[in-house]
Amino acid sequence: MASADVTKAAQHSDDAPPTTWKHGGGTEVAGFATGEGESFVGRAVTINRPVRDVFAYFRDFSNLPRFMENVERVDLLDDKRSHWVVKAPAGKTVEWTSRITDEAPDGFIAWRSEDGADVANSGRVEFRDAGARGTVVTVSILYDPPAGVVGKLIAKMFQREPAIQARRDLRRFKQLMETGEIATAAMNRKQHEEETA
Amino acid sequence: MRALAWHGKHDVRVDTVDDPEIINPRDCIIKVTATAICGSDLHLYDNYIPTMQAGDILGHEFMGEVVEVGAKSTLKKGQKVVVPFTIACGSCYHCGKHQYSACDNGLPADNQDIAQELYGQPMAGLFGYSHMTGGYAGGQAEYVRVPFSDVGPIVIPDGVDDEKVLFLSDILPTGWMAAENAQIEPGDTVAVWGCGPVGLFAVQSAFLMGAERVIAIDHFPRRLELAKRFGAETINYEESAVYEALMVMTGGIGPDAVIDSVGLEAHGFFVDNVLDQIKASTFLGTDRAHSIRQAIIACRKGGRVSMPAVYGGFIDKFPLGALMEKGLTLKTGQTHVQHYMPALLNAIMEGKIDTTFLISHRMDLEDAPKGYDMFKNNQNEVTKVVLKPGYN
């Protein structure tokens, strides 16, 4: 942790989530490793379904490509490890193997990519029973794209867009859980396929 | 199929486009039997609404026959339905509270960004009303794909004339909710700015809710005449000073509740329009936002302000001081159509509400561009254009 960040974190006095801190220092406080060029994203959504259902659907990672637009495929390797294939700019894909580092049923899932990841990342998704309002799902993700020319392209995607992507993905997750489908304005199946390709 | 498509300012055409299909399990497809041009369609026609794309199919007041159903639709082929203009899921927190126009899931995820940035949270989807409200193809067409068909469309009993029930799709519930938001108490005097379809339904609704007097304000003689038919007193703002007239007519008190059903025009959504708006509203006495300012100033102390009128962006010179100092209550919002439809269908069937008086013109869908032109340029005589595929 850089000394400037230590000072900032120490000075932080409010209850706002670390992902929303203006002056940095939030990543370490939230328990994430830091890295050059990282992008720290936080989003929350409330889903009008019991926490048990929401957690169970999410915990089966093979469901995730249904609502995570950029995720092409998630292969389950064992109970804790999964292999991710994610769309990257210029028709390319990036891949990594992710390991669950900690979890609690109906509570949270924390993960970290293993060595050799195209885009190192770690994150935490929390599920909180919100009573009559359903379940609050809060996602914090730290991306650390590689250096170099290719890295720059990927960084562009993983630094500027993950905040938008995470928000849209969570909206689709909510739609799927609450309505059983994902809203589309497409008029016909051909148009729909083009939009979701 | 044939459909009325937007191509730019004052340029709408009936094009041949691909037929819609079922995509999601809760969808249905309806064959349109009647559809209307709404006053708010003129905002699109005048190019005041951003995020329109050439080829977008317009229309959000429509009804028809169910011709195809998805696996989870509760409708049956052959049923006649009226479709709400708001696209709402029926399963989220807001739908659970019957705040359908605030539905969390009516908009495709990507289309929620603009409203999230502009308003703080995304709203429900709307048919045929720009990509900011979802980019859904509208009802001025032969066929429409209707999402969440198990929640939105209301089934109409056999043998009921389309024209009697068509306005359940938007303007009747909108006028009703406007009156409801005015929280009318028996004996109240209610003033209504704007005698377009929403204003005229607000007049009727206000009386049904117990208003003793309704004062209708407009400048089109034909529209004021319609308001008078329902028992309203009228003020023509081109002939009389509105605030002064209201104060004298209410014994110096002011109306107990005021309803602004005039709305935007010259109120675009984006920052680059804002300067123009400020200029327009500063230098032009006839600026449309004048109606909400005047309504707030005229309203009695402790009174209620209802604003069904559509405002998308910002207005300046908003009399916030009058709102606060007089202790007014302001209620507004896009209409929760699904919530009001069943009771209003009953009111129509029981003859408590007159709907067909509004229709001044009936045309074939093919003549829709002419309908837009007439509606835009002769608002005195053209109160409502109903389009019917195959009418000719």
Image (cartoon, grey):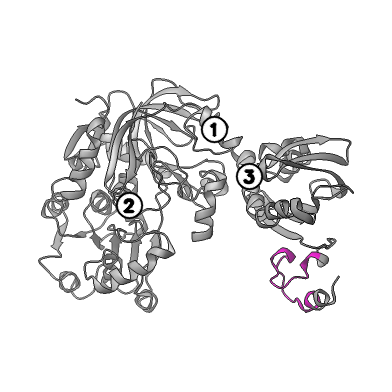
Q: Is residue A102 magenta?
A: no
Q: Nearer the viewer, residue B232 or A91?
A: A91
How far, Cα to Cα, is label 1 from label 2? 27 Å
Q: Nearer the viewer, residue A139 or B337?
A: A139
The numbered mark at residue B53 is none
Percent position of residue A118, x then y: 81, 47
Q: Amino acid at mark 2?
A: Asn
Q: Is residue A10 magenta?
A: yes
Camera-near label (2 vs 3) is: 2
* Range shown magenta: A8-27
Q: Quadrant of the N terminus of chain B?
A: top left
Q: Which residue is mark 1?
A: A192
Q: Secondary structure at mark 3?
A: helix
Q: Which residue is mark 3?
A: A174
The quarter holding residue B77 reads top left
Asked whether the residues under marks 1 and 3 belong to the same chain, the reply is yes
Q: Amino acid at mark 1?
A: His
